[in-house]
């Protein structure tokens, strides 16, 4: 039986990664890409499939029987907004996991979440909807990662870490066991986080410190 069709919302760098994961996972056939940013790209071939247009193509695609979609946009707020819009149209948000990722049997993964090559998700971890666990990131036991967070390549989360909704953990950062990262906060690349980070701040350094609030 042919695999069900899937739309990928996004047509830039992260979408390339997601398309590769989808094909390697082998659960869906890519029906095309959606690009809201550059509508003039409609009809262009991207990652061996057509860019169909902007969000205006979603209702007719759903009517034709394309029921599954994944949002491949790196920006956390935009990803959550697009996912909510697609859900409102009746799409099911697919979760995609690279075959080389290591997933504990009892890890829970939400809809629309992308887990990239070489990532490790250990037991009793809960990952929300539309999360990105990027290349070679490590999420240890009993972590909770809320909707729309982005765990960048090479990040190391100790056991029992909590990452808030829409938070961004920069490439190569390390977060100590049982630390909480607040909603929408941004941790800089290579940060070493030893204590809780409040919501909506930027923090970086070794050890990480809050350098400013987000407007």
Image (spheres, rainbow, N blue to C red):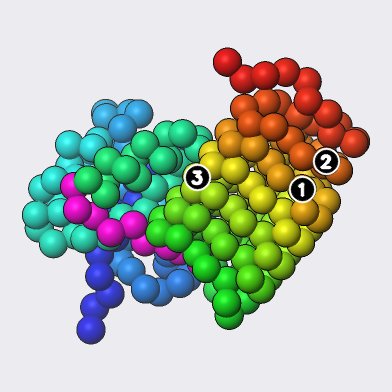
- Separation of residues labelled 3 and 2 (CA atoms): 22 Å
For the residues labelled 1 and 2, say whether their Cβ atoms are less than 8 Å apart. yes
Residue occupying the far top of the picture? 215
User: Going 50% across and 38% down the picture, which residue do you hit?
Assistant: 76
Query: Is residue 70 visible from the viewing direction of this image?
Result: yes
* Element type where label 3 sits in the image: loop
Residue 185's x, y, as percent?
Answer: 64, 32
In the picture, the disc for residue 148 is 3
Contact? badges 1 and 3 (CB < 8 Å): no
Q: Residue at point 61% right, 56% down?
A: 144
Mark 1 falls on what kind of element?
loop
In the rendering, which numbered label is found on residue 179? 1
Give x and y (percent) for residue 201.
67, 26
Mark 1 and mark 2: Cα distance apart in space: 6 Å
On whether residue 127 falls in the magenta region, the answer is no
- Classify the position of the N terminus by image quarter: bottom left
Can you tell which quarter of the image residue 157 is in?
bottom right
**Gap between marks 1 and 3 measured at Cα:** 19 Å
> x, y (%) of residue 7?
29, 54
Residue 22: which quarter of the image? Answer: bottom left
Residue at position x 40%, y 74% in the image: 26
State left or right for residue 187 relative to residue 43: right
**Lateral position of residue 177 relative to residue 68, left or right:** right
Choose between 56 and 185: the one closer to the eye.
185
Q: Which residue is mark 2?
A: 195
Please provide the residue range marked out in magenta. Answer: 89-97
Which residue appears at 58% of the width and 15% of the height? 215
Residue 98, compared with residue 180, is above or below; it is below
In the foreground, 195 or 149: 195
Closer to the N terminus: mark 1 or mark 2? 1
Say whether disc 3 or disc 2 marks the residue closer to the N-terminus.
Answer: 3
């Amino acid at each position: 039986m042919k695999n069900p069709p899937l739309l990928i919302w996004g047509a830039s760098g992260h979408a390339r990664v997601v398309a590769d994961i989808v094909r390697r996972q082998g659960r869906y056939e890519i029906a095309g890409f959606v690009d809201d940013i550059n509508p003039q790209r409609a009809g262009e071939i991207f990652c061996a499939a057509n860019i169909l247009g902007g969000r205006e193509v979603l209702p007719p695609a759903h009517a034709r029987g394309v029921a599954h979609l994944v949002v491949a946009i790196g920006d956390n707020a935009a990803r959550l907004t697009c996912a909510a819009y697609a859900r409102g149209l009746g799409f099911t948000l697919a979760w995609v996991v690279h075959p080389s990722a290591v997933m504990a049997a009892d890890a829970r993964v939400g809809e629309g979440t992308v887990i990239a090559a070489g990532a490790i998700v250990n037991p009793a971890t809960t990952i929300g909807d539309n999360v990105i666990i990027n290349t070679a990131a490590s999420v240890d036991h009993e972590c909770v990662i809320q909707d729309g967070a982005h765990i960048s390549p090479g990040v190391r989360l100790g056991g029992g870490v909590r990452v808030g909704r829409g938070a961004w953990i920069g490439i190569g950062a390390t977060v100590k066991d049982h630390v909480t990262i607040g909603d929408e906060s941004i941790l800089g690349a290579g940060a070493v986080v030893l204590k809780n980070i409040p919501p909506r701040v930027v923090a970086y350094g070794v050890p990480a410190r809050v350098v400013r609030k987000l407007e």
